[in-house]
Amino acid sequence: MKHTKSEALFSRARKLLPGGVNSPVRAFKAVGGHPVFIDRAEGAYLFDVDGNRYIDYVCSWGPLILGHAHPAVVDAIARGAARGTSYGAPSPLEVELAELVLDFFPNLDMVRMVNSGTEATMSALRLARAHTGRDLIAKFEGCYHGHVDSLLVKGGSGMLTLGIPSSPGVPANVTGLTLTLPFNDEDALKTLFRKEGDNLAAIILEPVIGNSGVILPAPGFLELLRALCTKHGVVLIFDEVMTGFRVARGGAQERYGIKPDLTTFGKVIGGGLPVGAYGGKRSIMKRVAPSGDVYQAGTLSGNPLAMAAGIATLKTLQKSRRLFDTLERHTTQLAAGLVGQAEGAGFAATANHVGSMFTLFFTDRPVNSPADVATIDPRVYGRFHRAMLERGVYLPPSQFEAAFLSTAHSKNVIEETLDAAGDALEAIAKKHR
């Protein structure tokens, strides 16, 4: 494949944008080579400025569960744009989307729309602190909850890719109120609550980690967490920005049968447009202004275009419960196939997957925590990523990120992907023997 136009654009971009990108992982530093610049997208495919076509397993980092440019979503956006792009005032669309979200997540009584997952987690923590009258919060190593200052402590996502445990510019006295503990470690969890349980306002986590690669909760871990939070009056926050609508119709809380006190959402509820939300029990949510005294606002919150796209997306998902079963079946087929192809070419590999999320790890050991991920040499994945890109498959440009399927990823698309993977892995094996 030729990438002449993408390389020229990247050269221009580096003079104008830090690192040539507007989000770090897009620079391809973790996998090598240059990023490709996308011209358009449709269904399961991306098309770059050089005319190359790629099967896309990033799906805008999760939200495009219906694939790119789904007709219902495009039509909703087009009709919405003709009625105005922003009101700064209430609209019926906000009410309808809220009703849809609560239909999928019956554990929630109320929801507040915001503009991103970062805003949602930031607001949920502020609300939890106000509700409990406590300042201390806790998170898990390798979980990423947006670039909120107090949460940039042992985060996942780009923080793992870049090897940065925190970030300059974040004052120590801000992160001093954030405790961290290892994921899936019951002893560490019990110790935390024994020492600080009565001082904790909230504990936040990705119930299935997606920002260190996909890592599933160990049996009983979420149940223990819920019980300890209830015992000590700690607000349990599920960050379902990634897992919402991905691991089950009603997210991780449906799949694992756990009821968090607050839940945060991201772009999937806006059909891929910039949007987020947080919601939960009425007794907590009624503290949010103007009903209560916890201030949070946003000019673009409830933006009509995002609401329209979200309504179209959720209504489409609402039509068939079998849709989620099909997505999971295809994901399982792809994950198993990739492991088989890797092992057939002489590479140790394992794949963690749930719902329509997966990560292929090049290791011969189980991956049950971010600490396990940290032991993996990412260079093999980097070679695999470059080889797949040349064969028309766009994977997450980091070993430490989740990949996603959409309803547009048909059985034929998966078979094409596995054929490309087999060829790519054989080529890598020959070159590095």
Image: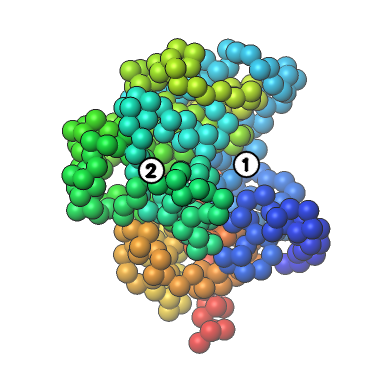
Residue type highlighted by circle 2: Leu
Mark nearest the camera among 1 and 2 is 2
Which residue is under mark 1?
Answer: 68
How many residues crowd mark 1 within 10 Å: few (<14), some (14–19), many (20+)?
many
* Residue hosting label 2: 177
Q: Quadrant of the N terminus?
A: bottom right
Residue extending furthest toward the front:
173
At a point 72% along the width and 46% down the height, the residue shown is 40
Q: Nearer the viewer, residue 364 or 157?
A: 157
Question: Is label 1 in contact with label 2 (beta carbons under 8 Å)?
Answer: no
User: x and y percent of residue 92 in the render?
Assistant: 58, 12
For marks 1 and 2, give the CA distance: 40 Å
Residue ID at (46%, 58%):
165
Q: Which residue reaches farthest bottom?
A: 433
Kind of element beneath mark 1: loop
**In the depicted structure, whether residue 259 falls above or below residue 144:** above
Q: Which percent across, then down, holds residue 350?
A: 37, 65
Q: Is residue 428 visible?
A: yes
Q: Residue 78: name its quadrant.
A: top right
Among the two numbered marks 1 and 2 on one chain, the one whose residue lies closer to the N terminus:
1
- Please determine whether, in this image, residue 274 is positioned above or below residue 39: above
Residue 228 locus on image (x, y percent): 20, 38
For the residue carrying disc 2, how many other residues have a C-alpha within 10 Å: few (<14), some (14-19), or many (20+)? Answer: some
